[in-house]
């Protein structure tokens, strides 16, 4: 087994400025970013490497054994196919200094590289599109974009082979050398032969050309991710003129054109790696994010959806210009005011305006590819196979869902569900693993059942991964076509408020989504990194752990929802901004706990003013074992549902509940639920009347003078009265 040199890793942890460091959490990548200036001009630049901390050149000892064919050797041995891309690699360097290694040298070194190699015909086609006739006429920036867009450094993980491509639609977990996520989609030829398309436009002609330091896949087009922002990409689509116009008129287009990268954060000095001195993970290296990108996700109705559902159509002249915008906007005003009211009726830029609110509910804070909406790891019956870092199972036996917060003054809640293979809904082809917005399902949710979806009481809105021949992977976000008009009307709010809402903590922090850290890193975060943690004391150490990470010992025995957790260390004191409640009403607010002797104790505060929150009761002691008088946990008795229900009731009377049956132990049998663990429980934080249009906060303050205590954050639950105190007992799932 070759040892990866990790080209972008720093060999020491000296202090450095982040604008000279290409690190992005798990692996340090040379990043090409687009910063949007006030005049709408796009400035393309590359971040330089810091010579004092990270190498731009390759040591001789890092080269692969010459008797083995490397990526560079493979290209050199096939000049009839790859002479052009090889010449570009010869020219382009890892960094901008004269000492920086060329990409040819990089691809001669030990490592695990995935190369989507454009053949000579593909390169020729691309440069002709630039209006030039030879690769010699490429500017350095043009050559760099071509070269770095087609290389993924997989680090310690194996290079992507065809069997590990996301399927049927998704994205690669690791970014390319320009720090862009590449999408991957299956398609079929006229005669039914399956093939893959990378980033919407590059067909894979030949896969799995294995060499000593990676895997090479031949493609028929140069991979060059778009530099458009999300609004520009929607506006360029031939079937989304109406929604693009709405973005313009409401000024949401301006909001989607904010700088892609936070340069203030970029210029701060910080350590690339943090080693905690205490806690259960003491001494392990936690990567500190060197970048803070901004990104968005949009759900967009194509023009034909507005035509079929609302009767809104476009009239065009001979040149293709729309001639009836006034009529279109008048119809939208009527439709939207029926849902959102008539405030600020004539000011579309006002967040109180109905059309503005309509658009805002389509936009999420956080950049997510299609296969990143939900996290598959340890839901009931899911078996991720032998490779925990890359679950290979494509069998989804149980529905998986997550909740996300929309943009705007009136934040809304969106539920996104991926339907399982075993769905009994006759209207769903579950084998395609479709994704729906605001779906309400009926499950086999008895104590002895398996949570199979029986039917969809509300089918929801179908989300498509791609938009025909239109690119949907922009510089700062993705958009996805939807098949119905998306509204946050009373029916949708009531539907969401009729269910138990279980919220994974990473979905509450958009930076985890945009910066590709969810289930993909082992990180430590400086104060101020997360906008939804508005207050965090200097004594707080915030860390994130994922079962999938290669630094951890297999993730065995973890009791985490979706296989990840946040740990807050030291004399912690931090405030968390919560997602909105869907409708006014009384709710139980719960949180998942994983108690053990290494934990700490915290006083919890709750309210709608982050600077004046009220204590919720006595401090929660995460060192406390269940099965005590305070937490009367009793193991279930097989076949005795009456006794089990009575034990659950007794536990609930003390403010605690067993963990959901839906979640299983990590790296164990997919039916080994954490409900069987006395250390995995739920705590009722508070019960209160909540308002949909208010923003609520939780504060967690250490109640111990204990530096090495850990406070665990995993998931929260919003539970309406109709669920926890309804005519039917709440299920154990």
Image (cartoon, rainbow, N blue to C red):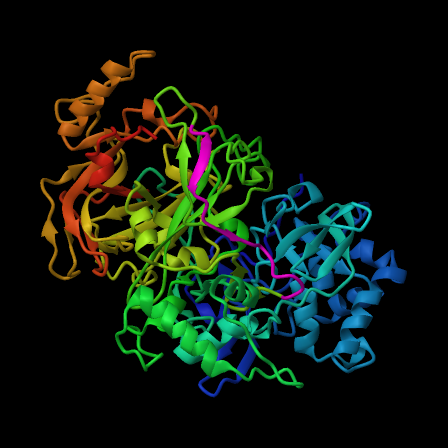
Dividing the image into 4 quarters, which one contains the N terminus? top right
The residue lying toward the viewer, choosing from 292 and 61, is 292
- Where is 355 relative to 374, above or below? below
Residue 7 at x, y = what percent? Answer: 60, 57
Q: Seen in the image, is 182 located left or right of residue 477?
A: right
Location of residue 185 in the rendering, given as x and y in whole percent from the top left corner: 65, 52
- Which contiguous range is marked in magenta? 451-470
Would residue 493 be visible to someone looking at this image? yes
Quarter of the picture holding the C terminus = top left
| Residue 70, x across and y down, in percent | 77, 51
* Whether residue 13 is visible: no
Relative placement, left or right, of 281 versus 49 is left
**Nearest the eye: 509 or 179:** 509
Q: Is residue 218 above or below residue 688?
A: below
> Where is 554 relative to 492, above or below?
above
Q: What residue is drawn where x is 43% and y is 67%?
A: 294
Would you say residue 433 sits in the magenta stretch?
no
């Amino acid at each position: 087994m070759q040892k990866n040199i990790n080209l972008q890793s720093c060999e020491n942890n000296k202090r450095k400025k982040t604008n000279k460091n290409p690190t992005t959490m798990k692996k340090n990548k040379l990043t090409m970013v687009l910063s949007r200036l006030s005049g709408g001009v796009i400035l393309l630049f590359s971040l330089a490497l810091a010579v004092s901390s990270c190498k731009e050149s390759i040591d001789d000892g890092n080269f692969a054994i010459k008797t083995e064919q490397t990526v560079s050797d493979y290209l050199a041995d096939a000049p009839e196919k790859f002479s052009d891309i090889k010449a570009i690699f010869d020219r382009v360097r890892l960094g901008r200094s004269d000492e920086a290694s060329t990409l040819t040298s990089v691809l001669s070194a030990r490592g695990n590289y995935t190369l989507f190699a454009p053949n000579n015909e593909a390169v020729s086609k691309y440069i002709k599109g630039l209006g030039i006739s030879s690769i010699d006429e490429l500017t350095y920036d043009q050559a760099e974009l071509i070269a770095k867009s087609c290389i993924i450094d997989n680090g310690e993980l194996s290079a992507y082979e065809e069997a590990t491509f996301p399927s049927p639609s998704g994205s690669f977990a690791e970014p390319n050398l320009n720090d862009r996520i590449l999408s991957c989609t299956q398609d079929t030829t006229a005669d039914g032969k399956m093939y893959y398309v990378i980033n919407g436009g590059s067909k894979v002609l030949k896969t799995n050309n294995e060499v000593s330091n990676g895997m090479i896949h031949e493609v028929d087009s140069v991979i060059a991710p778009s530099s458009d922002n999300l609004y520009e990409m929607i506006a360029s689509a031939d079937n989304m003129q109406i929604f693009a116009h709405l973005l313009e008129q409401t000024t949401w287009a301006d909001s989607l054109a904010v700088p892609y990268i936070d340069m203030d954060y970029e210029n701060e000095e910080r350590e690339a790696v943090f080693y905690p001195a205490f806690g259960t993970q003491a001494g392990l290296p936690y990567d500190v994010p060197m970048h803070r990108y901004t990104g968005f996700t949009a759900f967009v109705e194509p023009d034909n959806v507005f035509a079929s559902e609302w009767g809104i159509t476009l009239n065009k002249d001979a040149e293709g210009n729309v001639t009836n915008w006034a009529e279109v906007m008048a119809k939208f005003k009527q439709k939207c005011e029926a849902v959102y009211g008539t405030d600020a009726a004539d000011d579309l830029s006002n967040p109180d305006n109905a059309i503005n609110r309509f658009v805002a509910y389509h936009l999420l804070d956080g950049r997510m590819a299609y296969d990143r909406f939900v996290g598959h790891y340890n839901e009931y019956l899911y078996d991720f196979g032998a490779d925990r870092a890359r679950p290979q199972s494509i069998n989804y036996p149980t529905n998986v869902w997550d909740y996300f917060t929309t943009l705007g003054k009136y934040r809304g809640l969106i539920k996104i569900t991926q339907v399982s293979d075993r769905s009994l809904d006759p209207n769903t082809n579950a084998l395609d693993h479709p994704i729906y917005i605001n779906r309400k399902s009926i499950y086999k949710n008895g104590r002895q059942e398996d949570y199979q979806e029986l039917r969809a009481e509300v089918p929801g809105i179908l989300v498509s991964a791609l938009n025909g021949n239109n690119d949907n992977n922009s510089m700062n976000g993705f958009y996805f076509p939807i098949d119905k008009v998306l509204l946050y009307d009373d029916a949708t709010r009531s539907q969401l408020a009729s269910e138990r809402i279980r919220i994974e903590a990473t979905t509450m922090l958009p930076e985890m989504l945009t910066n590709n850290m969810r289930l993909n890193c082992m990180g430590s975060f400086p104060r101020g990194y997360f906008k939804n943690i508005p207050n965090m004391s200097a004594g707080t150490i915030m860390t994130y752990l994922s079962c999938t990470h290669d630094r951890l010992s297999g993730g065995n025995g973890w009791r985490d929802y979706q296989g990840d957790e946040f740990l807050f260390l030291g004399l912690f004191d931090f405030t968390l901004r919560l997602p909105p409640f869907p409708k006014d009403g009384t709710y139980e607010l719960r949180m998942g706990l994983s108690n053990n002797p290494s934990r700490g104790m915290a006083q919890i505060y709750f309210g709608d003013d982050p600077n004046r929150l009220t204590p919720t009761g006595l401090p929660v002691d995460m060192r406390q074992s269940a099965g005590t008088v305070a937490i009367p946990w009793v193991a279930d008795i097989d076949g005795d549902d009456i006794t089990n229900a009575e034990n659950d009731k007794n536990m609930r009377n003390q403010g605690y509940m067993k963990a959901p049956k839906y979640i299983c132990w990590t790296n164990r049998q997919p039916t080994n639920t954490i409900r069987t663990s006395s250390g995995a429980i739920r705590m009722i934080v508070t019960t209160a009347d909540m308002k949909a249009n208010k923003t609520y906060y939780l504060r967690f303050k250490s109640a111990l003078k204990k530096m090495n205590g850990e406070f665990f954050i995993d998931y929260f639950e919003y539970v309406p009265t109709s669920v926890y105190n309804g005519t039917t007992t709440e299920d154990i799932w």
